[in-house]
Image (spheres, grey):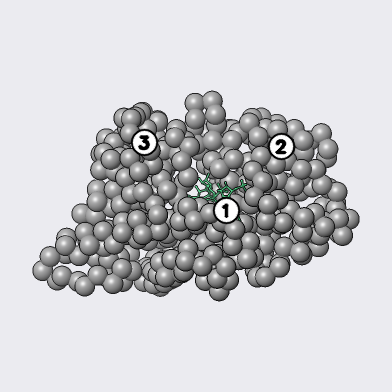
Amino acid sequence: MDNFVFQNPTKIIFGKAMETRVGEEVSKYSKKILLHYGGGSIKKTGLYDRVISSLKAAGIEFIELPGVKPNPRLSLVREGIKICRENNIDFILAVGGGSVIDSAKAIALGVVYDGDVWDFYTGKASPKAALPIGTILTIPAAGSESSTGSVITNEDGWYKRSAGSTLLYPKFSILNPELAFTLPKYQVACGAADILAHLMERYFTNTQSVELIDRMIESTMKTVIKYVPMVLEDSNNYEAWAQVMWAGTLAHNNLLNTGRVGDWGSHDIEHEISGIYDVAHGAGLAVVFPAWMKYVYKHDPNRFVQFAVRVWNVEQDFFDPEKTILQGIQKLEEFFTSIGLPTRLEGLGITDDRLEEMADKGTDSDQKTLGNFVKLRKNDIYNILKLAQ
Ligand code: NZQ
Ligand code: ZN
């Protein structure tokens, strides 16, 4: 196990009707905030009204910035920065999914930075300060509600890039599983794939002696595999949603990568896909991950056997480990299919051939590698995308 420092400061407020506490929580930080949300689902579900009345009851002034799109755009971030500066806003409340939260994080970085906020996403600058943010989560998926990351798409060239800093941990995140009842089935499935992907990115490591966290990752994966079909069957199943929502946070709050180095190659490859084609992140991952596995499993067959046996209950063939491994990958694909996700690029509606372009963009023309389990060069990424066709 590697040395590590773990400190996740996000206060999690979990359970039924907890969003009514938002005014009280915000008032610990600010009296004037930016209220940031997406394309309108929060209005349809009535969440918006509850948030507004809680903020008003706590005497909090707010300016609204709606319109965050999935794969959140840099242009709206710039607009948010301008609004915050002009109105002396010192706190951002994000109400929505990963896209809204990531957009809020980007605004939080940009308001207190003299240069261009995109600098943080290209690696030109590293964050030294950020406004505090809080969140009300409406979809278990990205884990941004207690992560250090923010992923933004720059429409100029359609680059989807991430920035990371401990400054971006939200001060608080309100998780009410009831808020997920209204999710369309496809979004539920995309969220599930993202949660599993966050777990798998951490699972496939070269670090040795990581049994404790291996077991914790496996049990979180098994929980997702068990409960996601239940919420798809009955969207009002609170107890099942509670399992899925908490799993989504635990999958990405960094506890499960303590003492080990995760991979993240599949995430980086997926960001090239959703950057160009604007597909849902989770759907992209359902396509990339099985292809990545087929390409790299020979690097550490034992770890892939363990994954097949412990997570997917594949019966181990002691004479033919490859058979066990491929059955595990097949089970993963079957799970994605069973919840309504594609596992090939074609299923994402991608039939043109820009594989070379994506491999090139993702590696800065073969100047950098992606992933850690196996370091992938441009040609490897091209081959993985080919396997995903
Ligand atoms: O915009 P609205 O109208 O709210 O609709 C949203 C959106 O269309 C809808 N939705 C959300 N909650 C709902 C709901 N509809 C009905 N009822 C509800 N309760 O769902 C759609 C998708 O929302 P989005 O926020 O895009 O989903 P998700 O949470 O999956 O976020 C995806 C983004 O997060 C990034 C991804 O790359 C992607 O851009 N990620 C962020 C990470 C991080 N910051 O740590 C890590 C992840 O790996 C990921 O890359
Ligand atoms: Zn993800």
Q: Name the residue at 76% across, 43% down.
A: 64
Q: What is the secondary structure assignment of the residue under circle 3?
A: loop
User: Label 1: which residue?
Assistant: 144
Disc 2: which residue: 80
Give the amino acid type for the residue marked by disc 2 in the picture.
Answer: Gly
Which residue shows up at 65% across the image and 70% down it? 15
Residue 277 sits above or below residue 178 on the image: above
Can you tell me whether the CB of the residue at mark 1 lies under 8 Å from the nearest atom of ligand 1? yes
**Circle 2 sits in a helix, a strand or a loop, which is it?**
helix
Which of the 4 quarters of the picture holds residue 27? bottom right
Neighbours of disc 1 within 10 Å: few (<14), some (14-19), many (20+): many
Q: Position of residue 312 (x, y in %)?
A: 31, 68
Q: Quadrant of residue 201?
A: bottom left
Q: Earlier in the sequence, mark 2 or mark 3?
A: 2
Dot label at residue 350: 3
State the separation of the CA atoms marked 1 and 3.
27 Å
Distance from the alpha carbon under mark 2 to that under mark 1 = 19 Å
Q: Position of residue 235 (x, y in %)?
A: 54, 65
Pick the quarter of the image with the N terminus. Answer: bottom left
Q: Is residue 142 left or right of residue 332?
A: right
| N-terminal-most mark, 1 or 3 | 1
Viewer-side residue, 171 vs 259: 171
Q: Position of residue 300 (x, y in %)?
A: 24, 58
Closer to the camera in the image, 127 or 331: 331
The answer for how far apart the CA atoms under marks 2 and 3 are is 32 Å
Residue drawn at the location 33% of the way across and 30% of the way down: 352
The amino acid type, in three-letter code, at marker 1 is: Ser
Q: Amino acid at mark 3?
A: Ile
**Residue 109, above or below 322:** above
